[in-house]
Image (cartoon, rainbow, N blue to C red):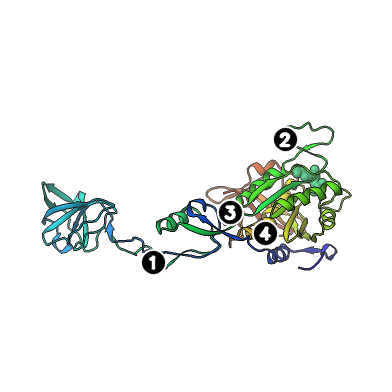
């Protein structure tokens, strides 16, 4: 990647993202039991080893019949039953039917099932009160999934539905990418741990909590480190430890051009490569991207809103790339503004909004990079172009970050 871009002016979000993503690769693959694969990302394609359903079977509790003999009013002799998990040994003969249950294999010779609600039964005589057509109430072998068909592809996340599918197909183990461990650091002499006395000029630290949760939501593991003082030595020591123990590191604060901003010099002093991007977005202009021993450093600004927004639009896709998933985008949904959104600045502004279940989009309050008040309710961003006011009623795309 190109060297230090710091003096080369501002970069578009797309440029910064593309440059970052080009240098990132998914973690190594490992084999895990299917039962341990939930939330993991497949590292290899998976093909079905069996047909699903595996055999023709009944979709109802009722009677297996020969359809041609099972018109309304027909009377058949019931010659046995097929509970689920067993099979009837003989072929069904003319004039016969078999008691059958949902999921039971269809006996040889039968080609339909009459629901028990459509019969009148006396001893072993079954009268059909509602006739059936061939293949009615039958699930055919392979109609759902065919043997050899792809049922999972590298890059897909093992969510509940995929677990059902692979489980039903008898997959015992899957290849998944190793979960990246992402270190979370916060720099700033003013920061205090929760419960600690604030003293003069102290504030409660909150970025690590939010960033760690956003990291976990990518499927990565977050490892939270103690607060880092604004000195070169403390920043170097903290980064060295985090890079020793993690696959990637996210820092907050200390990336501006102030005298107390040590993330960049510390990374360089440790021998890391540094790309410092002033990304043309609001909030969150200063953003550090760099690498140490091939592992990425994502340095977000300290302002809580800037930290979250730069995480969502820049760091999140980078960490997702490490997890191996192929879907790097925030879920985008159509919405309609209930309140206007005005961006009077010259950078695109990712404004915090609350979108409700019907797609109505409400402004979430003060749109300033230090303003945490709206973050409790906001669940999405709207990318408002520079010098643009989107009026009430405007159709917008919301980028959801809370589901
Ligand atoms: P910085 O990016 O270090 O210049 O910090 C910018 C602003 O964000 C300052 O007002 C900091 O006090 C505040 N800030 C920095 N880090 C944190 C943090 N981890 N939690 C809450 N606020 C922070
Ligand atoms: Mg600071």
Q: Hey, which quadrant is residue 97 in on the image? A: bottom left
Assign a secondary structure to mark 2: loop
Does mark 4's beta carbon lie closer than 8 Å to ligand 1?
no
Visible in this render: residue 28?
yes
In this rendering, the label closer to the viewer, 4 or 3: 4
Assign a secondary structure to mark 1: loop
First in sequence: mark 4 vs mark 3: 4
Mark 1, residue position: 147
From what the image shows, is residue 224 above or below residue 104?
above
Mark 2, residue position: 194
- Which residue lies at the image location 20% right of the left edge and 50% below the top edge? 116
Q: Nearer the viewer, residue 156 or 55?
A: 55
Visible in this render: residue 389?
no
Mark 3, residue position: 336
In this rendering, the label closer to the viewer, 1 or 4: 1
Mark 4, residue position: 318
Q: Residues within 10 Å of mark 2 (few under 14, many from 20)?
A: few
Q: Nearer the viewer, residue 120 or 338?
A: 120
C-alpha gap between disc 1 and disc 2: 56 Å
First in sequence: mark 4 vs mark 2: 2
Assign a secondary structure to mark 3: strand
Does mark 1's beta carbon lie closer than 8 Å to ligand 1?
no
Q: From the top left corner, tell me how far across and down residue 343 is, in percent.
A: 72, 55
First in sequence: mark 2 vs mark 3: 2
In this rendering, the label closer to the viewer, 3 or 1: 1
């Amino acid at each position: 990647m190109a060297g230090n871009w710091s003096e080369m002016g501002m970069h578009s979000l797309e440029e910064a993202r593309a440059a970052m993503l080009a240098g990132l690769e998914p973690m190594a693959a490992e084999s895990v039991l299917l039962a341990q694969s939930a939330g993991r990302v497949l590292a290899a394609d998976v093909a079905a080893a069996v047909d699903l359903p595996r055999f023709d079977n009944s979709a109802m509790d009722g009677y297996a019949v020969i359809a041609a003999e099972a018109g309304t009013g027909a009377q058949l002799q019931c010659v046995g039953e097929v509970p689920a998990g067993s099979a009837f040994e003989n072929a069904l003969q003319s004039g016969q039917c078999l008691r059958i249950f949902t999921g039971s294999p269809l006996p040889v010779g039968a080609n339909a099932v009459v629901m028990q609600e459509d019969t009148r039964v006396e001893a072993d005589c079954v009268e059909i009160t509602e006739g059936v057509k061939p293949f009615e109430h039958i699930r055919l072998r392979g109609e759902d999934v065919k043997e050899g068909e792809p049922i999972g592809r590298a890059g897909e996340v093992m969510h509940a539905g995929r677990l059902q599918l692979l489980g039903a197909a008898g997959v015992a183990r899957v290849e998944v990418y190793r979960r990246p461990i992402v270190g979370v650091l916060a720099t700033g002499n003013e920061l205090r741990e929760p419960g600690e006395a604030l003293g003069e000029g102290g504030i409660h630290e909150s970025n690590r909590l939010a960033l760690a949760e956003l990291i976990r939501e990518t499927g990565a593991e977050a490892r939270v480190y103690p607060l880092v003082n604004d000195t070169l030595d403390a920043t170097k020591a903290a980064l060295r430890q985090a890079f020793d123990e993690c696959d990637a590191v996210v820092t907050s604060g200390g990336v501006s051009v102030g005298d107390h901003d040590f993330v960049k010099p510390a990374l360089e002093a440790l021998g890391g490569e540094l790309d410092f991007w002033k990304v043309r977005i609001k909030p969150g202009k200063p953003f550090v991207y760099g690498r140490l021993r091939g592992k990425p450093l994502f340095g977000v600004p300290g302002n809580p809103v800037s930290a979250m927004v730069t995480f969502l639009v820049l760091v999140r896709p980078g960490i997702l790339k490490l997890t191996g998933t192929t879907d790097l985008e925030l879920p985008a949904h159509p919405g309609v503004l209930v309140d206007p959104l005005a961006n009077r600045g010259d950078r695109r502004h990712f404004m915090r909004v609350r979108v409700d279940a019907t797609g109505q989009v409400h402004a979430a309050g003060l749109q300033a990079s230090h303003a945490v008040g709206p973050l409790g309710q906001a669940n999405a961003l709207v990318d408002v172009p520079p010098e643009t006011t989107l009026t009430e009623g405007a159709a917008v795309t919301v980028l959801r970050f809370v589901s």
